[in-house]
Image: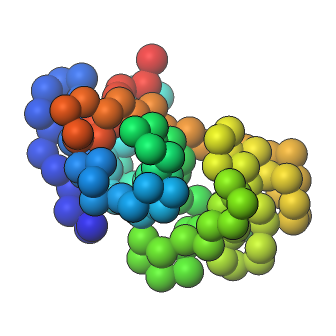
Amino acid sequence: MDTVFPVESPDQQALCRLDEIPDGGATAVDAMLADGGVDPKQSSVILLRRGEQVRGYLNICPHTARRLDYAPGKFLLKNDTLICAVHGATFNQADGLCIAGPCRGEHLREVALQVQDGVIHLLPRA
């Protein structure tokens, strides 16, 4: 899923359909993110699905600033954790907290999402 969906409204950007992510699985999508009101930049976002709920984080390890996936959109998931493929840092899927590895105590940067009519939308930062 390397496609950036067009912005549907000034407030929401469609990322993918919920059914494109297996329940209990994850994928990565590219999204246009604005940071601090500056021009949007294309960034990789991890989408983690549990039933109808989806959590989103930037696909960047806080320790190495490298992507967390071992191949594009492929993640190491174990017992409700996400494991960095580069050095094994382990993050809670529910809150992005690093619970093991060199970045212990740091968090992944969360991305605000909303699931509406089976489509996952990126919400603007408040």
Vertically, is 94 above or below 61? above
Residue 84 on image: x %, y %: 68, 69
Residue shown at 44% from the left, 55% from the top: 23
The answer to whether residue 124 shows anywhere in this view is yes
Q: Nearer the viewer, residue 14 or 103?
A: 14
Q: Residue furthest bottom?
A: 71
Number of numbered callouts drawn: 0
Vertically, is 102 above or below 70? above
Residue 123 on image: x %, y %: 35, 29
Vertically, is 6 above or below 124? below
Residue 5 placement, left or right of 126:
left
Q: Quadrant of the N terminus?
A: bottom left
Residue shown at 21% from the left, 55% from the top: 4
The answer to whether residue 46 shows anywhere in this view is no
Residue 18 placement, left or right of 64:
left
Residue 126 on image: x %, y %: 45, 17
Q: Nearer the viewer, residue 65 or 109?
A: 109
Vertically, is 61 above or below 111? below
Tell me where residue 69 sits by quadrant.
bottom right
